[in-house]
């Protein structure tokens, strides 16, 4: 199982939001590259970088910071936030990103996500972000009438090859993941699922591995030090 540290960027700084609320922000660093190097030193196998301003506004806003991370580390980097067209996907892949993450664009236009997957295979990851099982978009600020499992099944049938699933209500809370929802999503497809939201301790990581998650994206617990990456990696090695 991959344990993937998240670097969330807002205004060029590394932050964490509580349940995706842009008014409830904790700043962890003014130096994204230093943060990326820290995770490399801790044994990370991959880094998840989110342009929060881009996710909210629908266009890249922290491009220089994201590129600096990609250029600075010899690790696969997956990039999320504000990626809404094929040109943006191809631009990030050409810049050295290992994967691009689609969210809002895949919800609004599943055929677009399917075309992206046809062109770029497993380098396109669709993140399904849900509150109480209902998908949210636009930096999690807009609710839809789309059920998370329904969207997963539709996109998998269209050929999307890898997914992330975030329980928004658990994100940044350090409570616990929504294990039931993760289990449901894993059972709904043969495609790999990366879980996110609520991880606070090694036992949570182990349980997600037991449920069949391919990986887990961890933000707050790693950033504030309550979860140590080397210990978590050792537990699922």
Image: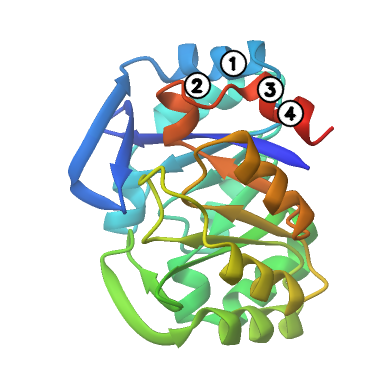
Q: Which residue is mark 4?
A: 233
Answer few, some or many: residues within 10 Å of disc 3's Cα (few below 14, many 20 plus, some between 14 and 19).
few
Q: Is residue 27 above or below residue 203?
A: above
Q: Is residue 106 left or right of residue 4?
A: left
**Who is closer to the viewer here, 124 or 93?**
124
Q: Nearer the viewer, mark 2 or mark 3?
A: 3
Q: Nearer the viewer, mark 3 or mark 1?
A: 3
Q: Which residue is mark 3?
A: 231
Comes first in the chain, label 2 or label 3: 2
Q: Is residue 151 above or below residue 165?
A: below
Mark 4–mark 3 Cα distance, whole angstroms, equals 5 Å
Q: Is residue 191 left or right of residue 164?
A: right
Label 4 sits on a secondary structure element that is: helix
Mark 3–mark 1 Cα distance, whole angstroms, equals 25 Å
Q: Do callouts 4 and 3 mark residues in contact (Cβ within 8 Å)?
A: yes
Q: Which residue is mark 1?
A: 72
Q: Is residue 84 left or right of residue 56?
A: right
What's the mark number on residue 68? 2
Q: Do callouts 1 and 2 mark residues in contact (Cβ within 8 Å)?
A: yes
Label 1 sits on a secondary structure element that is: helix
Mark 2–mark 4 Cα distance, whole angstroms, equals 26 Å
Comes first in the chain, label 3 or label 1: 1
Answer few, some or many: residues within 10 Å of disc 1's Cα (few below 14, many 20 plus, some between 14 and 19).
few
Mark 1–mark 2 Cα distance, whole angstroms, equals 6 Å
Residue under the image location 49 percent in, 38 percent down? 200
């Amino acid at each position: 199982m991959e344990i993937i540290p998240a670097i969330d960027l807002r205004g060029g700084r590394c932050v964490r939001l509580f349940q995706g609320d842009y008014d409830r922000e904790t700043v962890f660093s003014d130096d994204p590259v230093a943060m990326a190097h820290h995770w490399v030193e801790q044994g990370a196998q991959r880094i998840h970088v989110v342009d929060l301003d881009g996710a909210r506004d629908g266009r890249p806003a922290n491009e220089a910071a994201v590129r600096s991370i990609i250029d600075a580390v010899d690790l696969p980097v997956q990039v999320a936030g504000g990626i809404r067209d094929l040109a943006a996907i191809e631009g990030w892949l050409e810049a050295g990103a290992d994967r691009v993450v689609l969210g809002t664009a895949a919800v609004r236009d599943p055929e677009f996500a399917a075309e992206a997957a046809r062109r770029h295979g497993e380098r396109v990851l669709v993140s399904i972000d849900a509150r109480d099982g209902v998908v949210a978009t636009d930096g999690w600020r807009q609710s839809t009438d789309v059920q998370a499992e329904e969207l997963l099944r539709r996109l998998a049938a269209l050929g999307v090859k890898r997914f992330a699933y975030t329980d928004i209500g658990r994100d940044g809370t350090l409570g616990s993941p929504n294990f039931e929802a993760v289990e449901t999503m894993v059972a709904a497809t043969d495609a790999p699922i990366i879980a996110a939201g609520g991880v606070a301790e090694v036992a949570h990581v182990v349980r997600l591995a037991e449920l069949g998650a391919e990986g887990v994206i961890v933000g707050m617990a790693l950033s504030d030090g309550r979860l140590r990456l080397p210990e978590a990696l050792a537990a699922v090695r």
